[in-house]
Amino acid sequence: MVCAFEAAALGPINLASQRPKLRPPKGGRYITKTSDEIAFFSAINMTGKRYYLTTLGAWHRHAGRFANSHWLALGQAAPGDATGHFDPDEVTPILVLIEADEGAHLALEDDAAFEALPHPLGQKPISEAAQTALAAHGVATGATMFDAAEAVARVHPLLRHRVF
């Protein structure tokens, strides 16, 4: 089966047999895809990653729309505490890295419970509220999101900014 985007490889139609004559592309091989291969490749969604400050309850409300997400509870006990036990609830503030399609990110921007943080490769400093929430993890005043991501990656390595 030949896809529509490969129509350039088709030659003139032979009216006697109603079968197209195929000309090989410059490489000399024919390019064909089955309908299953086309369905597989069209089902792949493009996603993007973004950091947010929110609560665990707000994250739960939207979690079904995410391709992937990693979060760190910001109200947890300090590592030097005697008990070291932390029981998160729905109002626990979290820093979350969300991988989702554009529609999910637009929905999060419209939700007041989510504070979108700047892109890590941009040189914009994080908000004062974000700096205060992340101060326990060593994020200094005026830090960029890249600095903050590196600081929290000491606790949760999957929160480190990665291009691929």
Image (spheres, rainbow, N blue to C red):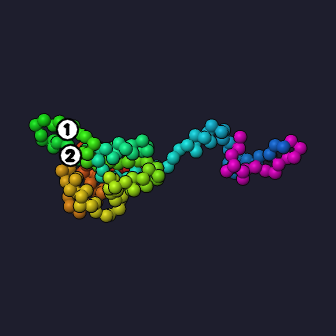
- How far across and down, in percent of the image, does residue 111 sit? 37, 54
Q: Residue at x 71, y 44 (%)?
A: 2
- Residue flagged by tag 2: what amino acid is it? Gly
Q: Is residue 123 visible?
A: yes
Residue at the extreme right of the image, as rendered: 16
Left or right, 65 with respect to 71, comes to right
Q: Residue at x 72, y 53 (%)?
A: 8
Disc 1 marks which residue? 86
Disc 2 marks which residue? 75
- How far across and down, in percent of the image, does residue 120 sit? 34, 57
Of residues 35 and 160, the one nearer the viewer is: 35
Discs 1, 2 touching: Cβ within 8 Å: yes
Question: Which residue range is magenta in the image?
Answer: 1-17
Q: Is residue 83 magenta?
A: no
- Residue flagged by tag 1: what amino acid is it? Phe
Q: Secondary structure at mark 1?
A: loop
Q: Secondary structure at mark 2?
A: loop
- How far across and down, in percent of the image, does residue 18 sit? 84, 43
Q: Quadrant of the N terminus?
A: top right
Q: Residue at x 47, y 52 (%)?
A: 103
- How far across and down, in percent of the image, does residue 11 sit? 79, 50
Q: Is residue 5 magenta?
A: yes
Pointer 2 local density, CA inside 10 Å: few below 14, some 14–19, many at least 20:
some
Left or right, 11 with respect to 32, comes to right
Distance from Cα at disc 1 to Cα at disc 2: 8 Å
> Does label 1 or label 2 sit earlier along the sequence?
2
Left or right, 19 with respect to 89, comes to right
Q: Is residue 156 visible?
A: no
Label of residue 156 in the image = none
Pointer 1 local density, CA inside 10 Å: few below 14, some 14–19, many at least 20:
few
Q: Residue at x 19, y 54 (%)?
A: 135
Q: How many marks?
A: 2
